[in-house]
Image: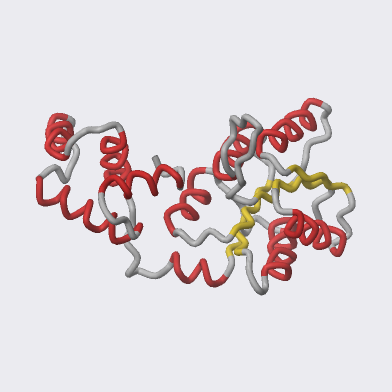
Amino acid sequence: MFKKVIIAEDLDAMNLGIQQVLKDLNIVDFQHSKFCDEAFLKIRAAINQKEPYDLLISDLSFKTDHRKSDIKNGDELVQKVRTLQPDIKIIAYSIEDKNFRIKSLFENAKIDGFVSKGLHSIEELKKAIHIISTSDQKYISPEVASALQDKNNYEIDDVDVQILKHLSVGTSQDEIIEIFKNSDIKPNSKSAIEKRLSKLKDFFKANNTVHLVSITKDMGII
């Protein structure tokens, strides 16, 4: 079982719930932070003191306030922590339900578990901590797991992300097509690009291209 845990969560009620889970599991050495920057500094300080944390439990969304922050959300936090301390175990604890964002956390940040905040989240969090501490298995909340396995879901790939990034800096669709053709990126036809944009708008429930770029920026996709 884990011996030293840090919680990154800005809501007091959620934070207290997580702390109670840790106490129920006889984990007594834990700290919490309401800000991503502060959590990251604590993790770095623990490494320097040669007393690193075993587990990070982090929300993904944090409310902004008057404080200047370098790390804006939990996605950025887990990415930076994974780079800083590759062997730390990480559980994302969130209401997030966007498949792309969750898959990105597992694939890019190599998180060890994802627990959905909800009716059964306390018991799920206990289960996740137990599984991750005693094996190399990953844990993901059942309702999210089934959504990720749904073959009817649109799969966002690197080409979609490149299109979104070009749009975010003002590149027109015609210019994107030329860039793709010159770089031998396929598909690169006008109809293929338009089809992808249409699917992306449907997937993210965006009203138009500007709205689509705004949504994907907020989600950290671009």
Image point (50%, 55%), residue name = 102
Residue occupying the far bottom of the picture: 119
Q: Quadrant of the C terminus?
A: top left
Would residue 153 appear left or right of 5 to someone viewing this image?
left
Image point (32%, 56%), residue name = 206
Q: Is residue 57 above or below residue 205?
A: above
Image point (69%, 42%), residue name = 88
Q: Is residue 199 above or below residue 209?
A: below
Q: Quadrant of the N terminus?
A: bottom right
Question: What is the count of numbered marks?
Answer: 0
Image point (55%, 44%), residue name = 75
State the image coordinates of residue 58 (x, y, percent, origin top left).
66, 49
Q: Viewer-proximal residue, 97 or 139? A: 97
Would residue 212 appear left or right of 60 to someone viewing this image?
left
State the image coordinates of residue 14 (x, y, percent, origin top left).
73, 58
Q: Is residue 217 above or below residue 148?
A: above
Would residue 99 appear left or right of 158 to someone viewing this image?
right
